[in-house]
C-alpha cells in the first residue's frame, strides 16, 4: 500500500492506494472517532457489486453504521438527491461527530462531499473512490458540488476529507467505458507531469485500458501524487492549482452542450485536444509539438460522440465558466509537457478555430 500526504496544515490527510485496502477501513473509522456513527453513501452500481464487502467489514469490526444507496449518473448530482441525503442523515440520527463515507465515483464523491460540508456546518468525510477517474482525481483536493441550471458544479464548496482510500479491487467491476473515461484525467496528468510519465502512459495505454493491475496502480499513484502536491501548494485554486483545469474549460462546455450524455473523461480528452489546437493557433507551440501532443489523445477512440453541434453555444457556455473574470474566457494551455500557460485569453475566432480543428481531428473528417 502507498500513502500520499495532502499537506494542508490542520486540514492535511492521507491518500492510501493499494489492493484490498478496504479491509483497513474500520480501523480508520475508529481512529477518527471510536464512538461516531458512520453513514455510508454508496453509488447504486457499486452497491450492486460491493455491498456485502462493505457491510461485512463494518459488521465484523463492530462499526455503528447506516447505509444509503445513491442514484448513479451525472444527472443525480442535483438538489433533489442532496435533499434525500439530508433527510436520511436526520432520520438516522447523524450529529456533528458523524462520519460520511462516500463510496463511488466522482458523482458520489462530489455530492456526498457537498452534503458532508454543509450538514450541521460540516461533518467528517471519507472518500472511497471506486472509478479510475475518482482515484486519480476527484476524490483528492476537496472540491465538492452539484450541477445547477444545466451548468456543471455551479454550487459547491471546498471541503477536505479526513482520508481517501483507493482500493484498486473496485476497478475489477468497472465497465470498460468508464476506464476509458478515467483515462481523460490520466492524460491530463501526463501533460502536467513530465516527459517520462507522458511516455509511460503512451507506451502502456493498452495495459491501462485492459486493467493490468501493476500498471494501473502506478498510474494512480503518479496522478494522485501530482494532484496532492499541487493542492498542497494551492488549496483554493488561486494560482498553481489552475493547471488542473487543463482541457476543462472546453470539457465542461461540451458536457453541458451535449446534455451530460457524454462522460466527463471523454469530454476532458476532447478538451485537451481543443486546448492543444488553441495553443498552436496562438503560436505557443510549433507544428511539430502539436503532432507530438496529439499522438496520445489520438490513440483513444471517442467514437464521434463529441461532435461540435454549435460552436456558438459552446462558446457561450464557456463564457459562463466559473474561472472567468470580467467576462473573458481564461484558458490553461500546454506549452510543453510539464509547462502550462495559465489564464490565457483567446478571441472568439481563435476559439472557433480550435473547436473546428479538434472536431475534425476526433471525427477524422
Ligand atoms: N471534485 C473534483 O475535483 C472532480 C474532479 C474531476 C471530476 N469530478 C466530477 O466527477 C464526476 C465524474 O466521475 P466518474 O467518472 O467517477 O463518474 P461516476 O461517478 O458517474 O461513475 C461512473 C459510472 O461508473 C459506475 N461505477 C462506479 N464505480 C463502479 C465500480 N467499481 N464498479 C462498477 N460500476 C461503477 C457508476 O455507477 C457510474 O455509472 C463528474 O461529475 C465530474 O464533474 C470532480
Image (spheres, rainbow, N blue to C red):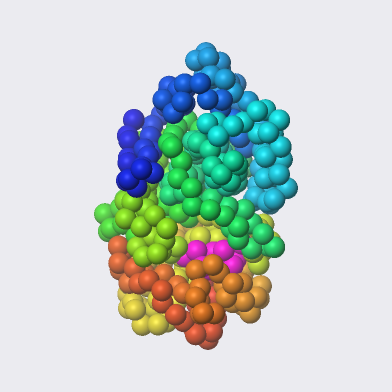
Q: Position of residue 338 (x, y in %)?
A: 30, 62
Q: Is residue 170 magenta?
A: no
- Residue 148 position by quadrant: bottom right
- Residue 20 position by quadrant: top left
For the residue pair 226 and 270, the one nearer the viewer reads as 226
Is residue 116 shown above or below 238? above
Does residue 199 appear to the left or right of 28 in the view shown? Answer: left
Q: Position of residue 279 (x, y in %)?
A: 40, 76
Q: Measuring 51% from the left and 73% from the top, which residue is drawn there?
A: 324
Q: Which residues are magenta?
A: 247-255
Q: Measuring 59% from the left and 41% from the top, which residue is drawn there?
A: 120
Is residue 210 shown above or below 62? below
Q: Is residue 245 visible?
A: yes
Q: Main secondary structure of the magenta part?
A: helix
Quarter of the figure that contains the C terminus: bottom right
Is residue 154 shown above or below 7? below
Is residue 359 shown above or below 119? below
Q: Is residue 47 visible?
A: no
Does residue 215 appear to the left or right of 109 in the view shown? Answer: left
For the residue pair 299 and 40, the one nearer the viewer reads as 40
Q: Position of residue 36 (x, y in %)?
A: 52, 25
Q: Measuring 44% from the left and 77% from the top, which residue is drawn there?
A: 278
For the residue pair 199 and 41, the one nearer the viewer reads as 41
Q: Measuring 54% from the left and 42% from the top, which residue is drawn there?
A: 122
Quarter of the figure that contains the N terminus: top left
For the residue pair 274 and 119, the one nearer the viewer reads as 119
Amino acid at each position: 500500500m502507498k500513502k500520499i500526504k495532502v499537506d494542508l496544515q490542520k486540514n492535511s490527510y492521507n491518500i492510501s492506494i493499494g489492493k484490498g485496502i478496504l479491509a483497513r477501513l474500520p480501523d480508520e473509522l475508529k481512529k477518527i472517532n471510536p464512538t461516531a456513527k458512520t453513514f455510508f453513501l454508496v453509488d447504486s452500481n457499486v452497491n450492486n457489486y460491493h455491498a456485502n464487502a462493505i457491510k461485512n467489514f463494518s459488521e465484523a469490526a463492530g462499526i455503528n453504521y447506516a447505509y444509503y444507496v445513491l442514484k448513479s449518473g451525472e444527472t443525480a448530482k442535483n438538489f433533489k438527491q442532496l435533499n434525500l441525503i439530508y433527510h436520511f442523515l436526520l432520520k438516522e440520527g447523524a450529529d456533528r461527530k458523524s462520519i460520511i463515507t462516500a463510496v463511488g465515483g466522482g458523482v458520489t464523491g462530489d455530492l456526498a462531499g457537498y452534503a458532508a460540508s454543509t450538514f450541521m456546518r460540516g461533518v467528517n468525510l471519507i472518500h472511497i473512490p471506486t472509478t479510475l477517474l475518482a482515484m486519480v482525481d476527484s476524490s483528492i483536493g476537496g472540491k465538492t458540488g452539484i450541477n445547477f441550471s444545466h451548468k456543471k458544479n455551479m454550487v459547491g464548496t471546498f471541503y477536505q476529507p479526513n482520508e481517501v482510500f483507493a482500493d484498486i479491487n473496485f476497478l475489477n467491476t468497472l465497465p470498460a467505458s468508464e476506464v476509458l473515461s478515467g483515462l481523460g484525467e490520466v492524460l491530463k496528468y501526463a501533460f502536467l507531469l513530465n516527459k517520462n510519465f507522458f511516455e509511460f502512459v503512451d507506451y502502456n495505454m493498452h495495459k491501462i485500458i485492459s486493467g493490468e493491475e501493476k500498471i494501473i496502480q502506478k498510474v494512480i499513484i503518479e496522478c494522485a501524487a501530482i494532484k496532492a502536491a499541487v493542492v498542497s501548494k494551492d488549496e483554493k485554486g488561486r494560482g498553481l492549482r489552475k493547471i488542473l483545469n487543463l482541457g476543462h474549460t472546453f470539457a465542461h462546455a461540451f458536457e453541458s452542450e451535449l446534455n451530460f450524455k457524454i462522460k466527463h473523461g471523454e469530454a476532458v480528452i476532447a478538451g485537451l485536444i481543443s486546448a492543444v489546437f488553441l495553443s498552436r493557433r496562438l503560436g505557443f507551440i510549433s507544428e511539430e509539438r502539436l503532432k507530438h501532443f496529439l499522438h496520445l489523445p489520438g490513440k483513444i477512440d471517442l467514437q464521434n460522440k463529441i461532435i461540435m453541434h454549435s460552436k456558438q453555444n459552446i462558446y457561450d457556455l464557456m463564457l459562463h465558466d466559473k474561472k472567468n473574470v470580467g467576462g473573458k474566457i481564461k484558458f490553461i494551455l500546454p506549452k510543453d509537457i510539464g509547462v502550462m500557460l495559465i489564464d490565457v485569453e483567446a478571441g472568439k475566432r481563435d476559439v472557433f478555430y480550435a473547436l473546428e480543428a479538434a472536431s475534425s481531428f476526433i471525427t477524422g473528417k
